[in-house]
Amino acid sequence: MNAAMTRLDWIIIAAYLLGVVGIGVLAGFVRKKSSEGAHYFLTDNSLKWPIIGLAMFAANISTVHLVSLAQSAVIPRNPGHLRC
């Protein structure tokens, strides 16, 4: 199986990255400078610490599971082949 990147692959990646960055820059210029960010990120100080802690824990666990699933695809199933 040939997994080399073709010119079309690079064009698609570049177009995607330019599109995402362009949308972000456009949104930054269009949005008025206001305190909307404080309301969004601080939730008007309405959340208590257990809810914030659970949200942080859930975000951390999801990242760990994503990385460990990728690792489990690479490591062979035979325990004798595991390298530390």
Image (cartoon, grey):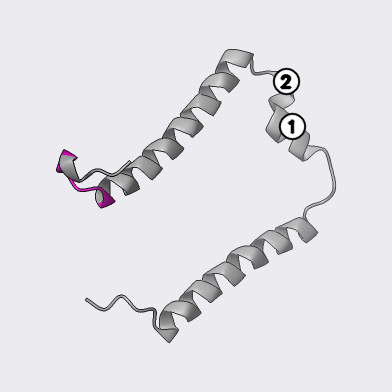
Distance between the alpha carbons at the discs numbered 1 and 2: 8 Å
SS label for mark 2: helix
Residue 15 placed where, x, y %? 54, 75
Outermost right residue:
33
User: What's the mark number on residue 67?
Assistant: none
Task: Characterize the magenta stretch by its predominant secondary structure.
Answer: loop
Residue 18 image-quadrant placement = bottom right
- From what the image shows, is residue 24 above or below residue 47? below
Residue type at the position of mark 1? His
Residue type at the position of mark 2? Asn
Region of the chain picked out in magenta, as a range: 74-79
Residue 61 placed where, x, y %? 43, 31
- The residue that label 1 is drawn on is 39
Give neighbour class at mark 1: few <14, some 14-19, many 20+ (Cα, 10 Å): few
Does 37 lie within the magenta span?
no
Indicate which disc, 1 or 2, sits on the residue closer to the N terminus: 1
The number of numbered badges drawn on the structure is: 2
Camera-side residue: 72 or 60? 72
Residue 64 placed where, x, y %? 42, 37
Residue at position x 50%, y 25% from top?
Answer: 57
Camera-side residue: 68 or 84? 84
Residue at position x 32%, y 46% from top?
Answer: 71
Camera-side residue: 75 or 55? 75
Residue 30 image-quadrant placement = bottom right
Residue at position x 28%, y 44% from top?
Answer: 83
Q: Quadrant of the N terminus?
A: bottom left
Does 76 lie within the magenta span?
yes
- From what the image shows, is residue 48 above or below residue 38? above
For residue 23, side relative to residue 28 (left or right): left
- The residue that label 2 is drawn on is 45
Residue at position x 72%, y 62% from top?
Answer: 25
Residue 43 placed where, x, y %? 69, 26
